[in-house]
Image (cartoon, rainbow, N blue to C red):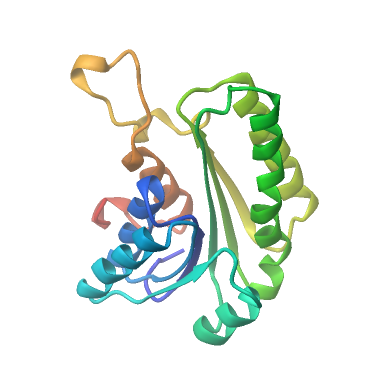
Amino acid sequence: MNPVDKVLLIVDGESGAGQDISETFSKNGTRIVLIYTDKEKAVKLKEKIEKMEGIINIFSRDEKNLYDKVKQIAGRVDIIINNIYFENINKGNEDFMNVLQSLDYYINFIKNARNFGATLIINAVYNKDDSFEYSMVKSVFDTFTLKYKTDARIFTVSSSNIDPEYIEKLPDKISEKKLQSSDITNAIIFSTIVDGINRKILDL
């Protein structure tokens, strides 16, 4: 899929790896529809992308009639990215249950992929460490993704299955292989560019 003139809907794309993803797609001609949690960061990102002459619309997670508004403004959505980062997931059962409950929000986007007209769904599920709890969350998410599978192609990008080619290797910490935001972005770009386009031309 060539990202030029496509419409990307990204959940929580206003900071961290999500911001990297939003900016990278925008630089390559993709219109961004961003569903944010942090309004201040989303507004700053919107200003930055618009200065680069990109097109971006931002919506709060709590927006009423969100699906209708997105379709009205963007017309269609080609790519949906569920950008899911879990931090401090190991603190206890209560935190873990809250994480599982939060998946409902992301799952709604998968359930509505057909309504949006999306042809590609990317689930970016990652955490600082490949903990047992994180693995469970990823498994739960993958299960729901398959349950609500549409005609869209589905990729899961996680810290446990990113090809080593896309891991940023720091010379002094080569054994640790900590994931960087760019690693997630590179893996997602690779998942998107499946029609033979040389990803090297993209501004990563």
Residue at the (69%, 30%) spot, across then down: 94
- Residue in the foreground of this view, choosing between 27 and 191: 27
Residue 35 place in picture, x, y as percent: 51, 64
Task: Give the quarter of the image for residue 100.
Answer: top right
Residue 67 place in picture, x, y as percent: 64, 75
Vertical position of residue 169 compared to residue 116: above or below: above
- Residue in the foreground of this view, choosing between 14 and 161: 14
Residue at the (57%, 60%) spot, across then down: 120
Residue placed farthest to the top in the image? Answer: 175
Q: Is residue 159 left or right of residue 145?
A: left
Residue 145 place in picture, x, y as percent: 71, 49
Q: Is residue 97 left or right of residue 17?
A: right
Q: Is residue 40 left or right of residue 156?
A: left
Residue at the (35%, 16%) spot, across then down: 176
Task: Give the quarter of the image for residue 6.
Answer: bottom left
> How many discs mark residues in the rendered view?
0
Q: Is residue 92 left or right of residue 25?
A: right
Vertical position of residue 45 compared to residue 158: above or below: below
Residue at the (27%, 69%) spot, across then down: 49
Vertical position of residue 128 compared to residue 48: above or below: above
Task: Give the quarter of the image for residue 97.
Answer: top right
- Residue in the foreground of this view, choosing between 143 and 57: 57
Residue 30 place in picture, x, y as percent: 38, 70
